[in-house]
Amino acid sequence: MRNSAIPNQLNWTDYHQSVRRITAKFNPNHGNYRIHDHEFVELAFVVSGTSLHHSVLGDSRPSSGDVFLFRPGAWHGYAEVKDFSIYNCCFDTALLGRELSWLADDPYLGRLLWGIPLSAKQHGMVSLHFKPQEFKRCCKLLDELCSLSQGDYLSHYGDHLGLLLQILSLLARNASANSGKKLSPSHRSVVSAIKLIDDAPTDPWTLKSLAARVHIEPTYFTRLFHAAVGLPPMAYLTRRRLELATSLLRRDNFPVGEVGAKAGWLDGNYFSRCFRKHFGMTPSRYRARFKAEIKDAG
């Protein structure tokens, strides 16, 4: 499961052409791939073959029709691959606070991108399975996006965005069909708050200040936010800061306390407790684990 040519943290500008914010590719012969995480959102669609999939949710043996969504910081890797083929679709997280920020107002797409992966048990990951006909439709859209990814990007950005939305819609309907929950649109205050947090996760937000910015009473705002996103606003802020902290831990050598401060925590010990609760290991262990992977790969 070692490949020294692949960085352990995949940075958008390293992994993709910097101008591209949405991209897709098909790998017909996917090899073993050591444990890694990302600074962007990744969608993985298993077409054929077998592998041992190590992920933040545990080990599994994915099969054709399995689909995974990974938010930043959600680590995974592949081992024991055999005849393994897969589509990868990735997009810059900046889209979630800008072009795609309205998705938080959609009961299905909001749940897929925020509500499910940011809940305490999911650790930034969503696992789905498509029926053959649904998966075939999804692959057709991915083929179109793969084809576009080979050509001029700027003049076809709208096409990239449209195909990504169709793919996300298929995933969202699949996730909601299996939930059995009745969904309704989010309140506009929730959408505004998500954009505020995503644009500036390190700002000294409090429940009172955030509620004031979206012009709603704090207690009612908390109920609305929890119903839409699956966790309270301050818990969502914590999750976004943790996504930022994983990037800092992997890319820089700042002391753990300084990483916490840069990610928005004034108390380094509280940062470490939050990190361990969400990722199952301390910040130091997280950093050491992936440094060991790099050493082993060399």
Image (tube, helix red, strand yellow):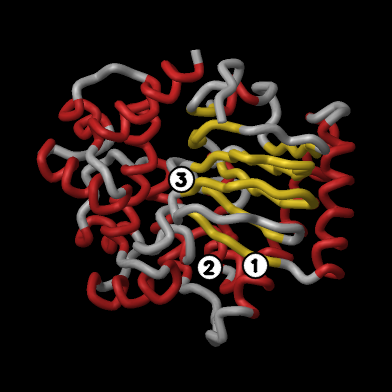
Describe the element under mark 1 as helix, strand or loop: helix
Q: Which numbered marker is on residue 118?
A: none
Q: In this view, does 26 lie above or below 127?
A: above
Q: Which numbered marker is on residue 172?
A: 1
CA–CA distance in space, label 1 to label 3: 19 Å
Q: In this view, does 196 lie above or below 91?
A: below
Q: Quadrant of residue 235?
A: bottom left
CA–CA distance in space, label 2 to label 3: 17 Å
Residue 97 visible at all: no
Q: In which quarter of the image is residue 84?
A: top right
Nearest the camera: 1 or 210? 1
| Dot 1 or dot 3, earlier in sequence | 3
x and y percentages locating residue 261 in the rendered image:
20, 32
Nearest the camera: 244 or 195? 244
> Residue visible at 66% across and 34% down?
21
The amino acid sitting under disc 1 is Ala
Q: Which of the image's four quarters has the N terminus? A: top right
- The residue where tag 3 is placed is 74
59 left or right, relative to 14: left
147 left or right, relative to 219: right
Nearest the camera: 81 or 103? 81
x and y percentages locating residue 182 in the rendered image:
55, 87
x and y percentages locating residue 27 in the rendered image:
78, 36
Q: In this view, does 141 lie above or below 289?
A: below
Marks 1 and 2 close (CB-CB < 8 Å): yes
- The residue where tag 2 is placed is 111
Describe the element under mark 3 as helix, strand or loop: loop
Q: Quadrant of residue 253?
A: top left
Marks 2 and 3 close (CB-CB < 8 Å): no
